[in-house]
Image (tube, rainbow, N blue to C red):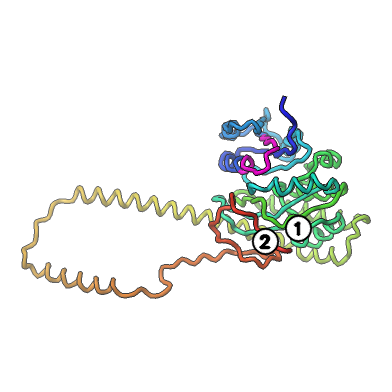
Amino acid sequence: MQAVPHVSVCIPVYNGERFLAETMRSVLDQSYRDFELVVLDNASTDATGEIARSFGDPRVRVAANATTIFQPENWRAAVRLCRGPLIKLLCADDLLHPRCLEYQVGPMETDPGIALVAARRHMIDEKSRILVPRRGLAGLTGLRTSVEVARRVVRSGANPIGEPGGALFRRAHYEAVGGWHPERRHAMDLDLWMRLLHHGEFLGLPETLAAFRVAQQSLSVDNEAGVYEHQRAIMAELAASPHLQIRQVDATVGRVLAPTGRLRRRVLFGMSKHAARRDERSTDLAGLGQVRSRTGERIRRSAPRLRPLPRRSPVVADRARHEHEAGQLLQRPADPGVGEEVDDALLLDDGSDETPPPQARQVVGQLPATDTQ
């Protein structure tokens, strides 16, 4: 019988063949080794199950539902399969930094009073390029009480803590508060975070230890509206709790900023769609170039042979003169800036004054970014 691991990372997945292998590798490459990786296939119709079972690592356990179930129920089922006392749920297209568990497990082991630890994350596109770096935890780094966190959440009008991939929590607390709530499907993470903090404190790490993927089809208009409404409902509950002592100014600022958070989400998904379309155009142009090359070769092969012109033909003389003039033009220095591509990345303000890395920088394997916020 296998020893019980200290940490369980679970990946609930449905038709995730495109990114699942990359996500699983980011978990298996962790510097912290005492963990299991549980993959729950929600009766996928693609190669998800095949990919999950292809990893010959004893830490990987793969299970599958007989039929496809509601996504929140699949999340709950994935956690039920976990054996470790510390739990991380990772969506099937997100990534972890190689030292994510190392940074997060240590404080949880050292201080039993911590109920939830979270880190910042990069927003990445479908090619794992960073769209927006070091997002989240504005005003929430360091050790914080539930009252401090609730005030910051209400004041932000959004989810400053972040998605499940950037967080680690205790299984005992998860079970005590009833786990993921399906009725809050579009804000299940924030809903659970605030309930977990009834059992202890929050630790926000300034390092960037995860990446949240923003794919073209990740968010429909209906889901975006659902996120907004469910977050508003959570803010109202927090503001009404006498224990959390939410101030009127916090609630007022949150109501003003909530639409701004909604706009940021739309801009972020718009950036991802733009990057995807640009990649598609590049692929199309590369394919067109190959077609033109092959077509040109066929034309050259099928063209009839032309008889050579007489040695002193005036046409030859004119052609030589034009070639000489064209050569003179090519030797002139080019205008400065011509042909240089300018690609300004949009950096959404998260309170950090750090310079963002290049847009094409890969997230996996880079060292954690820190700041003093």
**SS for tag 2?**
helix
Does residue 127 lie above or below 10 as drawn? below
- Label 1, on which residue? 158
Residue 27: say if magenta.
yes
Give the spatial CA distance, label 1 vs label 2: 10 Å
Task: Tell me residue 336's x, y (percent).
Answer: 41, 75
Residue labelled with disc 2: 264
Question: In percent of the image, x 66 and y 31: which residue is there?
Answer: 61
Q: Nearer the viewer, residue 327 or 85?
A: 85
Figure quadrant of the N terminus: top right
In the figure, residue 266 lies in which quadrant? bottom right
Q: Is residue 64 above or below residue 345?
A: above
Residue 331 position, x and y percent, is: 28, 72
Q: Is residue 245 left or right of residue 108?
A: right
Does the residue at mark 1 contact the one at mark 2 (Cβ under 8 Å)?
yes
Span shown in magenta: 26-39
